[in-house]
Image (tube, rainbow, N blue to C red):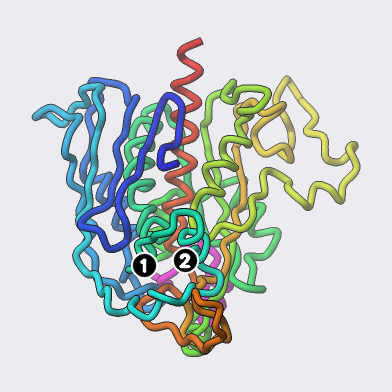
Amino acid sequence: MSTFGQKYRVTTFGESHSKAVGCVIDGFPSNFKIDQDALQYQLNRRRPGQTKLTTQRDEKDKAIIISGLNTQHLTLGSPIMIMVYNEDMRPQDYKQFDDIPRPGHADFTYQMKYEIRAESGGGRSSARETIGRVCGGAIAQQYLSQMNVSISAWVSSVGNIEIPKEVQQQLILNPPTQDQIEEVNAKYQFRNPHQESALEMVKLIEQVKLDKDSIGGTVTCVIKGCPIGLGEPCFDKFQAVLAHAIMSIPATKGFEFGSGFEGTKQRGSAHNDRFKNLKPITNNAGGTLGGITNGENIYFKVAFKPVSTIGLEQETSNFKGEDIILEAHGRHDPCVVSRAVPVVESMAAIVVLDLYLLSKQK
């Protein structure tokens, strides 16, 4: 399944080492002017080689809009196709994986399911596929911005290093904008607005990289200004659709909405968001009630696992079942969370726009 959405549908295409990757967007309203610079801005936030902490694959990730616009960049209501050429492939780095499924990677399941796989670069299981998601999310964000809906995310933990709880709570109440997050990223080379923990996280990732290993972390996202009434009971509750979208991102291992697991430690008398003048005075629910948005900030956290491909020697097996030692080569992120920030924002934007357009049909 390469398509997400009911009304606003985003279909991603391409493999890590194919000629190009991208997306086809269907269901976007007509007569809307697309800002190509804003689209490119989002792709630049995701692209590899940004810092010494990311993969050094040298890709410009230039977005090319193939269809769906007129000469004034206005949408026609027809499918919008966006393509990004792959330019810096090194298939020789993956030759060793022809007969060896990488531990923790999709090599094994893709081969078993389809009896074939794009062994060079990981194919569709590669995070390169997320370019199409960011393209679809960038277009959605442009439409949502005219509705005063804003979406921003940041790294909230790496390994056992976390943003202090009280700081995290303030960030959720008053989230930084995407531009503010990028200012932080330019300063610390990391998308964490809390300076002290950001520097500790960077130091940890640097050590992990020296060790030829990898490490995971979490990203927190806030959606502000979401209209009341989005979400379709019973099976398409807002948070259910959002969880589907977010958990489809490569390397995700967990999704926490609103108060999440911490809320299970409270009693109902403390957890309930009581109303004053028909407005909640707290927001433990995370911006929905009964799976329908209530106008408050929507916030959630997503966990990303350590990257599977590492340089350390690992005892494993080849496809013949023979025990071997694998020492993987190539260019890979030691930690994906900072680059995952715009991907999380993009999938959130796709969900909000899809459910908004769906609500307009009723």
Q: Secondary structure at mark 1?
A: loop
Counting residues from the N terminus, which is met first, the one under dot 2 or under dot 1?
2
Residue at the extreme top:
362
Magenta part of the chain: 186-204
* View extreme (front): residue: 320
Q: Which of 277/305 is in front?
A: 305
Q: Nearer the viewer, residue 320 or 278?
A: 320
Q: Which residue sits at x=60%, y=66%?
A: 157
Residue 337, can we see it? no
> Which residue in the structure is indicated by mark 1?
119
Whether the magenta-drawn stretch holds residue 194 is answered as yes
Residue at position x 62%, y 32% in the image? 296
x, y percentage for residue 164? 67, 65
* Image height of 35 relative to 227, above or below: below
Please tell me the numbered disc located at residue 250: none
Using a 10 Å C-alpha cutoff, classify the residue at mark 2 as few (fewer than 14 neighbours), some (14 to 19) or many (20 or more): many
Q: Which mark is residue 107?
A: 2
With respect to residue 262, does 205 lie above or below?
A: below
> Magenta stretch: residue 56 in it?
no
Is 303 situated above or below 281? below
Give the amino acid type for the residue marked by disc 2 in the picture.
Asp
**Whether residue 270 can be seen here:** yes
Residue at horizontal 46 percent and vertical 77 percent from the top? 100
Q: Secondary structure at mark 2?
A: helix
Residue 66 pos. (x, y %): 16, 39
The vertical placement of 158 against 269, above or below, is below
Q: Position of residue 325 (x, y in %)?
A: 52, 89
Pointer 1: residues within 10 angstroms few (<14), some, or many (20+)?
many
Determine the CA span between mark 2 and mark 1: 7 Å
